[in-house]
Amino acid sequence: MRNVSNLRSLSAVLVFLAAVLLSACGGRAVKGSLAQPAVVPAGFDVTIVADKDNQFDLDGAPLTEEDLRSALRYRKDQNLPVASVLMKRGEKEKIKNEHIIALARIAYQLNIKAYIQDKSGEISEIRAQLKESDENAQKPQASK
């Protein structure tokens, strides 16, 4: 009887040590540029909704990526506020990678801030940048 209780105690200690070892191995340092928290504004200038077929819903109108870019550019030209754009999940449509990529592309081109709101209500900023190959292509080449 005593051997059974000693065996259980030993196995409990081993499980505890294994858990401690696994938790010690799990932490990795995140790059500083990736870990910067987004500064979420109190309100947003434009709110869009993810729609089916990789489209966006702006004030009840379904828009493609090009149409959304044109609508935001028009707002900018008319001096209407467009500094921050929030994309929410649609009633029947979730936010897909295609939605995020399209909005990131638009935000980068128009120099605006873009945010997405997930189903739990948490808001995250979308930050886009050029790839190294694209940056090298845009730099002027020195000719001799």
Image: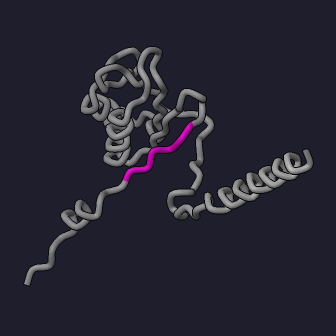
Q: Nearer the viewer, residue 38 or 83?
A: 38
x and y percentages locating residue 102 in the rendered image? 32, 37
Left or right side of 124 for 25: right
Quadrant of the rendered structure where residue 51 is? top left
Predominant secondary structure in magenta? strand
Quadrant of the rendered structure where residue 66 is? top left
- How many discs mark residues in the rendered view? 0
Q: Which color scheme did the rendering employ for the protein? A: one colour
- Split into 4 quadrants, where in the image is the C terminus? bottom left
- Split into 4 quadrants, where in the image is the N terminus? top right
Q: Is residue 77 shown to the viewer in this render?
A: no
Q: Nearer the viewer, residue 87 or 9?
A: 9
Quadrant of the rendered structure where residue 104 is? top left
x and y percentages locating residue 131 in the rendered image? 29, 59
Q: Is residue 82 shown to the viewer in this render?
A: yes
Q: Is residue 9 above or below residue 106?
A: below
Q: What residue do we see at 45% from left, 45% from top?
A: 126
x and y percentages locating residue 108 in the rendered image? 35, 48
Left or right side of 65 for 93: right
The boundaries of the magenta stretch are 123-128
Furthest residue to the bottom?
144
x and y percentages locating residue 125 in the rendered image? 50, 44
Q: What residue do we see at 88% from left, 47% from top?
A: 5
Left or right side of 81 for 39: right
Q: What residue do we see at 28% from left, 64% from top?
A: 132
- Whether residue 67 appears in magenta in the rendering, the answer is no
Furthest residue to the right?
2
Q: Is residue 32 above or below residue 62?
A: below
Q: Nearer the viewer, residue 32 or 26?
A: 26
Q: Nearer the viewer, residue 129 or 80?
A: 129
